[in-house]
Image (tube, grey):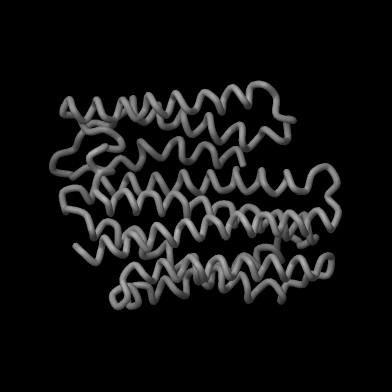
Amino acid sequence: MPQSTLSPAAAPAANHATPATDAAPIDIRGAVLLAATIALLLIPLTLGRAEDWPVWTWIALAAALPFAAVFVATQSRTERSGGTPLVPPSLLRLPAARLGLSALLVFGTCVGGFMFSLAMILQLGHGFTPIRSGIAMAAAATGFLGFALLAQRFVARYGAMVLVVGAFVFALGTAAFALTAGIAEDDLTLPETLLPLFVAGIGWGMVLVPLLGLTLGALPVDRAGLAGGVLSTALQIGLASGASILGSTLFAVIGDHPDPDAWQNATYAVAAVLGALALATATLCFRLHTVTKST
């Protein structure tokens, strides 16, 4: 979990892309402010429950808002002065960029939370060994890879509606896994997990694989390089946020008595949160579909 807070903090500088023929200096001030905002949000969410929510966690969460406000103001000021900010406000005024960024952030949160909570539910809730848990998670990865090989063909024919369907397929797979795990309680077997997780993986691939390409394809060519870095950063932030948010949700529901009923309720709670995130993703992708159709 702590590592998940560091990767997006480093991402802004690493993903700041500009055309090679006119390289711009890295927006160090923007990168520092964004990294600080992310850290102030994710570190308390990651460590708060284990530490019984000490005062510093609430101070950090409260401080994230002014840091975010300063970051936004700095980006606007840098762009007005002719510089190249980390996240140009003019880029976010483009509907495709704004919708793609939001969808990647939301679905990244969904996927990050799914992978973390799945490992916890299988190993701690149902006694799976790391190897058995890895095999179960490989079913999701197989579904993801399977659709990745077919993504271009489907997107060429149906456009961003593939992403909308994919978000619902992902929600269906996670709901099926939650019901299977809840009904089985202590008797969950590895074969019972494979089909629902494979379905979730297909939905995962239907959204994540085409989303970046569709978004960049709807943008002016001169903005695509910078947009790619911003979108990649949004995805990494979402992945780390998902692990923190869904991890906190999982263990908050379990509480101090991790009996089978507590794990069952926690599994259902995680599935509900993932379903809500998938629905939000579907809504954003549908709006992206309308934008890409008109370009």
State the count of labels: 0
User: Going by the picture, which residue comes out furthest to the left?
Assistant: 21
Locate residue 184 relative to residue 111 in the image: left or right: right
84 and 41: which is toward the camera: 41
Residue 85 location in percent, x, y? 26, 33
Residue 225 location in percent, x, y? 23, 48
Locate residue 225 relative to residue 145 in the image: left or right: left
Q: Identify which residue is drawn at 71% across, 35% down.
A: 49
Quadrant in which residue 176 is drawn = bottom right
214 and 62: which is toward the camera: 62
Residue 290 location in percent, x, y? 29, 63
22 and 89: which is toward the camera: 89
Q: In which quarter of the image is the N terminus?
A: top right
Locate residue 54 relative to residue 227 in the image: left or right: right
19 and 77: which is toward the camera: 77
Locate residue 126 relative to residue 113 in the image: left or right: right
Quadrant in which residue 260 is drawn = bottom right
Question: Image height check: is 166 above or below 124?
Answer: below
Q: Identify which residue is drawn at 61% across, 32% down.
A: 44
Q: Identify which residue is drawn at 39% across, 71% down.
A: 162
Q: Quadrant of the C terminus?
A: bottom left
Question: Image height check: is 173 above or below 124?
Answer: below
Q: Identify which residue is drawn at 40% across, 46% down.
A: 234
